[in-house]
Every structure is written in structure tokens, then in C-alpha cells.
Image: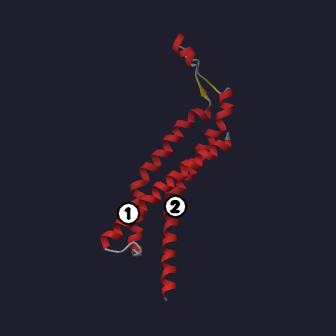
Amino acid sequence: MTGVGIVSLAGIVVNNGIVLIDYIDILRRQMKEEQGLGENGRLSLQDEIECIILGGKTRLRPVLLTAITTVLGLIPLAIGFNFDFYGLLNELNPHIYFGGDNADFWSPMSWTVIFGLTTSTVLTLIMSPVMFLVAVRARNRFIKESKE
């Protein structure tokens, strides 16, 4: 089940990264149109940084909400919280207990997703914009050197 947790974690992390980087790219495209630059035009470094900061500010809430709701939703599964639906409906006694066979089966997956998502959210919000800026600066430097 840990492997299933890693696969599901990868899907969430990739989605968060795409949401962030795609919005930064949309902001860059809008700024190029405002400045009258063509599709191949280059923004100044300050404009690139401004787009990255604005994109990070705007997409901070969706990325954090995705991570927080997933982590909080998986905590009962991780600690093995169980109750008896049949007993709750028939006797109004849910027979709440922790552990059991369900916890042995699902707990590794939920802990994998919880810790992986916590770590990857921090990396997505910090490292993705930094790496995007590094890539833009490298591309601009390469284009500048190839023209000379």
C-alpha cells in the first residue's frame, strides 16, 4: 500500500506544480501582450520576478488547501480510527476503536501521502518558482550569447 500512496502522491504533487507554473506562464504571456512584445519577446528580469511572485501569491491558497484537506482527511485512516456502521444504525452504538485489520492495511499508504504531501507542498511553493526563474535566466543568457 505504500507504493499506492507514492503513486497517488505523485499525482497530487504534479497537479500542484502544474497549477502554479501554468499560472505564472499565463501572467508572463499577459505581461508580454501589455508591453507589446511578440510571442518570442523577452521580459526583463524584474518583470519575470514580478510574474513569479504574483503567481505564487495567487496560487498559494489552492495549493495549500489541496494539501491541508488531503492531510486532514487521511489522519483518521493513518491512526486507524474505526467505528461500526451497522452498530451505529441499529443500536445507536458505533463501537469506536483504533487499530485493527483496516489500520494494518491502509495506514502505510496514508502516512506516505501525509508526509510526502507535506514535504512536497513546501518544495512546490519554494523550489518550483526558483527553478522556473533559473530556467528563464539560463534561456535568456543562452539566447543573448547565441546572438553575439
- Furthest residue in direction front, as rendered: 39
* Of residues 118 and 140, the one drawn nearer to the viewer in this rendering: 140
Q: At 59% from the left edge and 50% from the top edge, which residue is drawn?
A: 10
Q: Tell me how the rendering is colored.
A: secondary structure
Q: Where 121 sits versus 73, above or below?
A: below
**Label 2 sits on what residue type?**
Ser
Tell me residue 12's x, y (percent): 54, 48
Q: At 64% from the left edge and 34% from the top edge, which residue is drawn?
A: 106
Q: Say how many tags the image has.
A: 2
Q: Where 25 sits versus 19, above or below?
A: below
Q: Mark 2: which secondary structure? A: helix
Instruction: Give left or right: position of 33 versus 22.
Output: left
Using the rendered view, name the quadrant where residue 57 is placed: bottom left
Tell me residue 81's x, y (percent): 59, 28
How far apart, in angstroms, are the residues tagged by discs 1 and 2? 16 Å
Q: Decide which of tag 1 and tag 2 comes sooner along the chain.
A: 1
Q: Mark 1: which secondary structure? A: helix
Instruction: Give left or right: position of 137 versus 35.
Output: right
Q: Where 29 sits versus 124, above or below?
A: below
**Label 1 sits on what residue type?**
Leu
Q: Which residue is mark 1?
A: 27
Tell me residue 136's x, y (percent): 48, 71
Q: Which residue is mark 2?
A: 128
Q: At 52% from the left edge and 56% from the top edge, which residue is drawn?
A: 124
Instruction: Give left or right: position of 93 versus 101.
Output: left
Q: Residues within 10 Å of mark 2 (few under 14, many from 20)?
A: some
Tell me residue 128's x, y (percent): 51, 61
For the N terminus, the quadrant is: top right
- Camera-near label (1 vs 2) is 1
